[in-house]
Amino acid sequence: MPQVVVIGGGAAGFFAAIRAAELGAQVLLLEKTGKTLAKVRISGGGRCNLTHNCADPATLATHYPRGGAELLPAFARFGQPETLAWFAARGVRAVAEADGRMFPHTNQAETVATCLEQAARQAGVSLRLSTGVSALEPRPGGGYTVQTTAGPLEADRVIVATGGAPKAEGMAWLARLGLEVVPPVPSLFTFNLPGSGPLQALAGVSVPAGEVALPQLKDARRGPLLVTHWGLSGPGVLRLSAWQARALAEAGYQTPVLVNWLGQKPASVLKMLKTLREANPKKRLANLPVPGLPRRLQDYTLQASQLPETLTTSEAGNRHLEQWAQALCQDKHLLQGKTTYKDEFVTAGGIALHQVDFATMEARSLPGLHLCGEVLDVDAITGGFNFQAAWTTGWLAGTAAAQV
């Protein structure tokens, strides 16, 4: 019976600990704070978006800016279907929403946290709170001495599930083992546009299918957009922040932003405006029924076009409509900083993936040391994908660590 120490009482740590204990290992779970599963309890606005309604491993892997290729075979072993079955067997049924996010049937994150805590107790996992780890020391005959704030512990296998760190210094104790740490930078953040006063006055306005682009980085992402008091948010922005997390950090979060409020090509928008003009004679442009465009945003784009508020369709020439189409499709702003998305802190960075065997989540150069969850250089867009990576890598780490 191997003695397994799991470091980190979050989603990946609990899943790894439960799996190892259910396979017969003697498992001790260490959490440096006074409570476990903090992120599970606050995620999804307190509802816990535990996975996404995407069963195909190949499709699932495309939602990870970093780690998708490595996770693909891992998802084939323990992916979304296995995750749903695992929770269902323990009384938690997942319900899919229209956008693919899946939540517990109770719509309460506490249901997921309670499920994990109960499963850990039933499997025989021992838990120690307020116990930090400062170092791991490989033993000559195999295994590790775990240096903790409560004294040293001995382990045959160690699973590290400490989550992402805001700075590389937070992973210095792992770097001392010879592991390469990719410097962490924030991912999944909203855009601060402090010089866009007229836009910020529309806080709360949203569009269902816009597009936001970073022309200097040659990237654009589609999705719902939301105007905030500080700038721009919504799935489209969050996706872009995830894929360009490192480039934006290197740019100091200072770069031009282009917003396409309708998510369509300028030629298509111009054609639509011309059709609306012909179908609505003598009507003010401000009163045209532009599909997918809220009235306040319509007024804003007309003002940005420098067109008279009283301009009617009978007075509007093609040049006027071209100006409006330009404002609708290429609304220019300057990114000057970021804001964390709600309370969900996600980092791009962590233990370099080439150092980990994703069949066992074991460090290639350190036998008996397994890594899972956000301590790895793996992250995803919103929608339950980060939790799915935690369940998958935790299950694989726990499975391998329990082997004699």
Image (cartoon, helix red, strand yellow):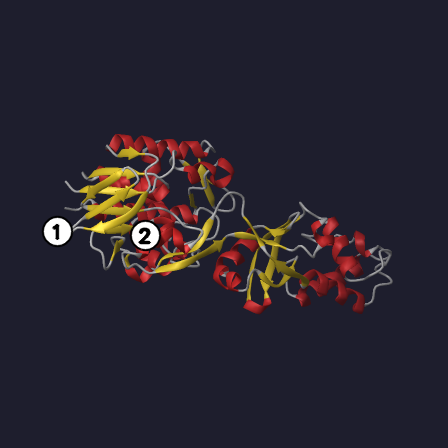
Report crowding for label 2: few under 14, some 14 to 19, many 20 or more residues within 10 A (C-alpha): some
Q: Which residue is mark 2?
A: 173
Mark 2–mark 1 CB contact (< 8 Å): no
Q: Which quadrant holds the N terminus?
A: top left
Q: Earlier in the sequence, mark 2 or mark 1?
A: 1
> Is 304 displayed left or right of 242 in the figure?
right
> Is 230 displayed left or right of 13 in the figure?
right
Residue located 60% across and 59% down the image:
211
Residue located 54% across and 47% down the image:
341
Residue 18 seen in the figure: no
> Is 31 displayed left or right of 97 in the figure?
left
Residue 215: x, y in percent?
59, 67
> Is 208 displayed left or right of 119 in the figure?
right
* Total count of labels: 2
Quadrant in which residue 267 is drawn: bottom right
Quadrant in which residue 377 is drawn: bottom left
- The mark found on residue 67 in the picture is none
Residue 110: x, y in percent?
43, 32
Residue 97 seen in the figure: yes
Quadrant in which residue 217 is drawn: bottom right
Residue located 48% across and 49% down the image:
382
Residue located 54% across and 44% down the image:
342
Residue 386: x, y in percent?
42, 49
Query: In terms of secondary structure, where does tag 2 sit?
Result: helix
Q: Which residue is mark 1?
A: 141
Residue 264: x, y in percent?
63, 62
Query: Marks 2/1: CA distance?
Result: 21 Å
Of 98 and 67, the residue lying toward us = 67
Query: In terms of secondary structure, where does tag 1 sit?
Result: loop
| Residue type indicated by callout 1 | Gly
Report crowding for label 1: few under 14, some 14 to 19, many 20 or more residues within 10 A (C-alpha): few
| Residue type indicated by callout 2 | Trp
